[in-house]
Amino acid sequence: MRAVLLILLSLLCAAPAGAQYTSKLDERASVVFPAKPMAMDGVVSQIQYSTLDKDNKITAMATAIDAGQFGVDSATLAANYNNQLFVEMITQSVLGQYPGVQVVSKKKIAQDAFMGYDISLANETPGGSVPYSTIYARILFAGTKVYALTVLALKDTDAQADRDKFYRSLKIN
């Protein structure tokens, strides 16, 4: 009886619904996805992973960009952190990926020892190329590395808990 209970407990612990997958974004950072992520092809300096939640209503994406490959050093990134034009360029970059969405909020944040921005977007008319009604983006700077975590949610889907868990899972050494 004890062996059967141990087997059942082992099966429950290994069930796919509870599975989490850690992906290395680069030599310094990793993030935990709620389901097995798929590597996406990007430009040479970019690594991107994407996955859907078990209900296919929330998409989580992670990207690592080495600004050093574009000739930008860490001092330049740090010096521009408080520059409003720099913040606006980042916001426009996020907006450009999702036509028709509007900025709901943007704020400076700190996660561990790293500075960055949280940007929340809303899509009043989801459909077509942007089926998501809510988009959350967190951009963090670590030396010459820029890490972007994005959570996209379909209409009538509350993704805040998933977003917070995904954001907290980012580990940078």
Image (cartoon, rainbow, N blue to C red):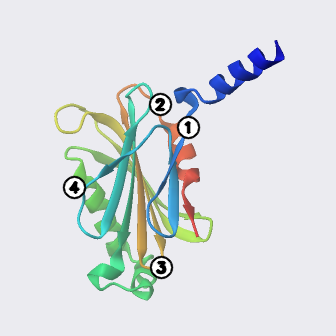
What percent of the width, then of the height, locates residue 38?
Answer: 35, 45
Q: Nearer the viewer, residue 7 or 32?
A: 7
The residue sitting at the top extreme is 1
14 or 148, nearer to the observer = 14
Of the image marks 1 and 4, the number of the one nearer the N terminus? 4
Residue at mark 1 to residue at mark 4: CA–CA distance: 26 Å
Residue at numbered disc 2: 158
Q: Quadrant of residue 134?
A: top left
Q: Residues within 10 Å of mark 2 (few under 14, many from 20)?
A: few
Badge 1 or badge 3: first in the primary sequence: 3
Location of mark 3 (residue): 143
Position of the C terminus, as image quadrant, is bottom right
Q: Which residue is mark 4?
A: 96
Task: Please tell me whether residue 89 is drawn above or below residue 61 in the rendered image.
Answer: below
Residue 13 lies in quadrant: top right
Mark nearer the viewer, 1 or 3: 3
Q: Are marks 2 and 1 in contact (CB under 8 Å)?
A: yes
Q: Amino acid at mark 4?
A: Gly
Label 2's element? Answer: loop
Q: Is residue 9 above or below residue 58?
A: above
Report the Cα–Cα distance between label 2 and label 1. 8 Å
Amino acid type of the residue tagged 2 in the rendering:
Asp
